[in-house]
Structure formats: C-alpha cells, structure tokens
Image (tube, grey):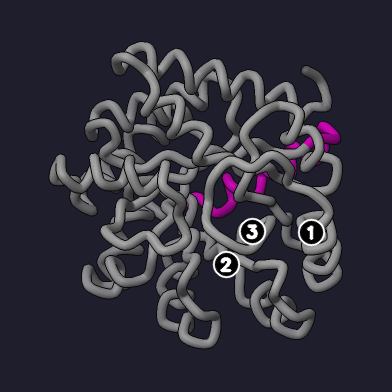
Amino acid sequence: MSGNVQLLSDTLAAAKSEERSALIAYLPAGFPTVDGGIAAVKAVFEGGADVVEVGLPHSDPVLDGPVIQTADDIALRGGVRIADVMRTVREAYEATGRPVLVMTYWNPIDRYGVERFTAELAEAGGAGCILPDLPVQESALWREHAEKHGLATVFVVAPSSKDARLADITAAGSGFVYAASLMGVTGTRESVGAQAQDLVRRTKATTDLPVCVGLGVSNAVQAREVAGFADGVIVGSAFVKRMLDAPDEAAGLDAVRALAADLAEGVRGTE
C-alpha cells in the first residue's frame, strides 16, 4: 500500500473549489491514552476537520507550548511508541477515509530508521509527514524514501524566513507548506494577525503548493480571519486544551467534536 499524498492534495483542492480554507486539526498520539487518542482523531473528523495531524510525542518538543507539552508528557508516561502512532494513523484513516499526517521532530525518525518509518507510515495509509526541525538541506534521504512511498513532505516556514530561503523550502516540499504564523511556540493567541498574512503572501510567491497557517488559532473568529488569506487553517493547542480540561474522556471527545464543528463554520466564513 502506498501513502496518501494524492488524497491530501485532492482534499485541499476540494476545499479550494468550495471557495474555503481546509480545516487541519492536530492531536498527539497516545493522549489521553492510545485508544482515547484514536477516538479523538475520529471525533474531530466527525466535527468537520478535513485533515488531521497526529503528533508523535517527544520529550523535548521545542516548538510546542505548555498545553501540547502537557499532553505529550501524559502520552509518554503512558508508554506511547511509534507503533502506537502508526496504529492511530491506520485506524483513523480506515474509519474515515480522510488524510492523516504525522507531525514529528526528526530525532525519533532518525533513530527508528527512515526507510522503516516511511514504509510503515505508507502501509498505515498515512498521507505524509510534517517535519518542523528537519533542515531542507539535510532532507534528501527523507524525501527520497517519502516519494518512493507516496508520502508528502511538509516543511515549516516562519516570518523570519527570507524570500530566497522560502523558495528553497517550498521547492523541496510537497502536499502543502506549513506557515508558522508568528515566532515562538505553539499555543492559543489573542490575535493571529498581519505577520501571518504577509508570510502567506511571500510564500505563495514561490510555490503553487497550498499554504496553511498554524500557531495561535483557537476559535471560529480567528479561523475565519486566517481563512481569508490561507489555504488551510491549522489548530492544535485549542483541541488539546479541550481534552485536558474535560472531566472525563467522553466529555473530551464531545468537546473536540464541537470545537471542530465551530472551526469548520469559521473556515467557511460562517459562525
């Protein structure tokens, strides 16, 4: 079985044809448990997410704020393994037929083995990988195996990225470009703002790939704002916080499903 990069591209194209942004949700694998994490991914799809990023929990998630760090700690204490991440991708994809990516730092893949990781992710039905800390100039081995297995390679661009650097990054990527809306770590923000809009404009000047914005979006108003200039709206910490704040797992699933529905209306320009 090859990966689902085409499914990802088709999903983003379908949202564009509806004159809206795609809603991309992030949830870490193994949180609150492996089974609970799988149920959460299914719940956000049920609520209206177009794509889900499954996080591979890391002990030192340098780009993630305290909410996601807390969830990663819970998952790691629960003994989550890469096999559990693959199972999360597989069960979510098989249940929904929607694109599921993995978001991970490079070190776990490097230790696991690039060929093994890409082969297993493709076999699970994964659409690709978001690699926030893999420098493009060091990515040739990864991209070779990802392409062989039909997986997207999504790189992250930031407001600090110069135009020439943006062109290098977007030329090497596939699926979409992840535009980090501001400098700093993930987390909800009061405003996502002009910096993100300028980054999307500069990134789009270098590529035909969809440009999706993450870091800071937490409600329908912000989702609608970002949907005005981005091809996709990425939401992570707000979903994780709903799960953390819930009194039990069932309530958490209801909360993330409801948030996905709210955000799905936001990206459609309605509330």
Label 1 secondary element = helix
Q: Which residue corresponds to mark 2?
A: 155
Q: Distance between the residues labelled 2 and 1?
A: 18 Å
Mark 2–mark 3 Cα distance, whole angstroms, equals 10 Å
For discs 2 and 3, the disc positioned in front in the rendered view: 3
Residue bearing mark 3: 180
Q: In this view, does 250 lie to the left or right of 8?
A: left
Q: Residue at x 33, y 52 (%)?
A: 56
**Pair 3/1: label in front:** 1
Task: Choose top left, top right, bottom left or bottom right for residue 181.
Answer: bottom right
Q: Residue 255: image x %, image y %?
A: 47, 17
Mark with earlier residue (2, 1): 2
Q: In which quarter of the image is the C terminus?
A: top right
Tell me the kind of residue under disc 3.
Answer: Ala
Does the magenta portion include 18? Answer: yes
Q: Which of 203 and 176 is in front in this view?
A: 203
Range of magenta residues:
3-20
Instruction: Decide whether the magenta segment is chiefly helix, strand or loop.
Output: helix
